[in-house]
Image: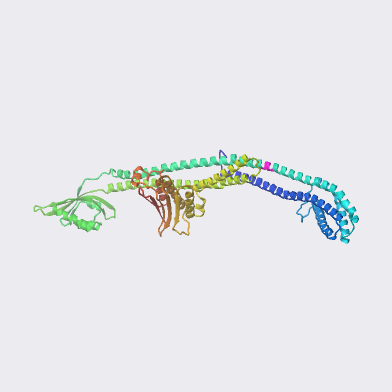
Amino acid sequence: MSEKPKYEKLVRYYLIALCAIATSIILSQILVQKFISEQKNDSRVINLSGRQRMLSQKISKCALLLGDSTQSSQRNKYLQEFSLALSDWRDTHLGLKNGDGNLDIISRNSKTVQFLFQNIEQDHLAIVRAAENIIHKLNENIQAPTDSIKEDIDQIIKHESAFLKGMDMIVFQYDDEAKTKVTNLQGIEIFLLVISLGVIMFEIFFIFIPSAKTIKKTFRQLLQSEQKSKKMTLELSSLYSSLEQAYQDLLEVDVDVEDFTIFAKCKANGDFTYFSDKFSKLMEFEDNTPQNLFKWLQEQGYEGAYLEKIQEMMPYGKTWSGEIKVINEMGDFVWLKVNITPTMGDSGELETLMIIATDETEKKEAEAISQEINRERIEKKVKEQQFRSALILEGQEEERKRISRDMHDGIGQLLSAMKFNLEGIHSVNTDIERNKLKTSKDLLKNVIKEVRRISFNLTPSALSDYGIVPVLNKFCREISKLSDLQVSFENQTGFLTRLEGKVENNLYRICQEAVNNAIKYSEAKEVKITLSHNSQYLNLEISDDGKGFDMRKLEEKGHFSASGHGLFNIRERANFINGQCTIFSEKGKGTKISINIPLD
């Protein structure tokens, strides 16, 4: 486990430990319940055994009173009491020997008790016979003389002492056997306690400690992946900054450009009078040559008003310079750097327009190709970087889910099992041990609560089961309990369907980051999270009433462009789900973060 911990092995050890704990608890409960049942029977038996002594003495007393009384009313009263005592005494004696459901007695007499009952059986039968004779005689004649029942009374008195002595021995034997059972149960409880403690030690050394090492190692790997993510984010920022430099480099592409030459001549109104061979070849004019310069440029797509301004410049002897993009007769683009120079006559009037130009097509095509190559290369790097960042974020979420699942399903369940095991321990003798046991139970409850809190913060299981709304509700309640900050959540969406998993995960992480920032820096008393939507966008808004901050200063310090800062992480997560993040803050007026996500 310490060298190569696996979840499957952890589950197997967990099941073994849980079965051992469950077995010890079940055995302990069976023994306790059995002991309680036997104790109830033993208590009943000892009670009835002691009652037998009282009844035998009552029988003797009533017999003597019947012999002394002469009045019929007194004899009837004593006879009735005598009969009831005899009936109870006889039935209880049989019940103690053989068991009796009516008396709630189960016959579990040991051989010693059975032997003691045999010793007093003759005395019991003698008393029963004598008592029955007295009852029979008095029922026939309530005024029967005392001499007629004196022999039976003497018989009862004679055997009472031996019966009482034997009954005392039976009661003492019942008591000794009950004490022996208690002593045996204490030994068994101690044995089960040792087994339970052994199971707990097994769990600590073979499950909890290796699991803690595994989680610690996983957290370390997660931190390393986060550092890689930060590094890649910085590289992405540098790529964006180098994009501008790449465009600057494109301007330095060295392509030979020919010298300016006369391409054509025109009249004052723009009608062509001459085409150079180079111009005709470049534009591939054959029989379909253009008639007018300005009409030709208008046909090429240039606006008439712009061309009219050029025409208006010519009579004043002003030269127009610029680049034009035209299409030759084969449909290819041609870039020309053109100077339209007017020539004046002796009278100062405009006579000719000289079109002096050079072909820049190769240079423009080279610049376009170079720019496209650089743009594709940069876009490729940016996409690769974004893809890596997305994979890292998804990997982090999966790792959080795995750690959360392992803590909840593995360590959480084992801690619960240990809690049940500790609560099943009852055989504690001293106050110090009781206090230690109580302290251990309280500590274990706090550990279970903390494990559940960490598991929820990593990735709440309800996020994948029920969605973002229930989880944000629970998140706000938990934060309000654990901090002085009052966090509330308002759902204004009324969605009937779930969002994508990555959208819900990132929305939850954004809320976590924003609330943590409010706790650490804003000195806010209340934070409100609102989820709403319209036909096109889902809106998440987190606002607080804290002290706010100066947006410009944070931008200058790089809080919005460097990883490791909460606001930067919020923007990155919003971009990851194609969302638009807007942050409003002003000193003394709190902060509001708004995330808009398109609903496709």
Magenta part of the chain: 188-192
Tell me, yes or no, if residue 287 can be seen here: no
Residue that extends furthest to the left in the rendered view of this protein: 347
Q: Nearer the viewer, residue 454 or 401?
A: 454
Q: Is residue 463 left or right of residue 332?
A: right
Specify whether residue 198 is painted magenta: no
> What residue is drawn where x is 67% and y is 46%?
28
> What residue is drawn where x is 83% and y is 46%?
165
Instruction: Determine the main secondary structure of the stretch shown in magenta.
Output: helix
Q: Position of residue 205 (x, y in %)?
A: 59, 39
Q: Position of residue 151 (x, y in %)?
A: 90, 53
Coloring basis for residues: rainbow
Q: Nearer the viewer, residue 230 or 445?
A: 445
Tell me, yes or no, if residue 204 can be seen here: yes
Q: Nearer the viewer, residue 266 or 405?
A: 405
Q: Position of residue 500 (x, y in %)?
A: 46, 54
Residue that extends furthest to the bottom in the rendered view of this protein: 140
Q: Position of residue 233 (x, y in %)?
A: 40, 44
Q: Is residue 299 left or right of residue 130?
A: left
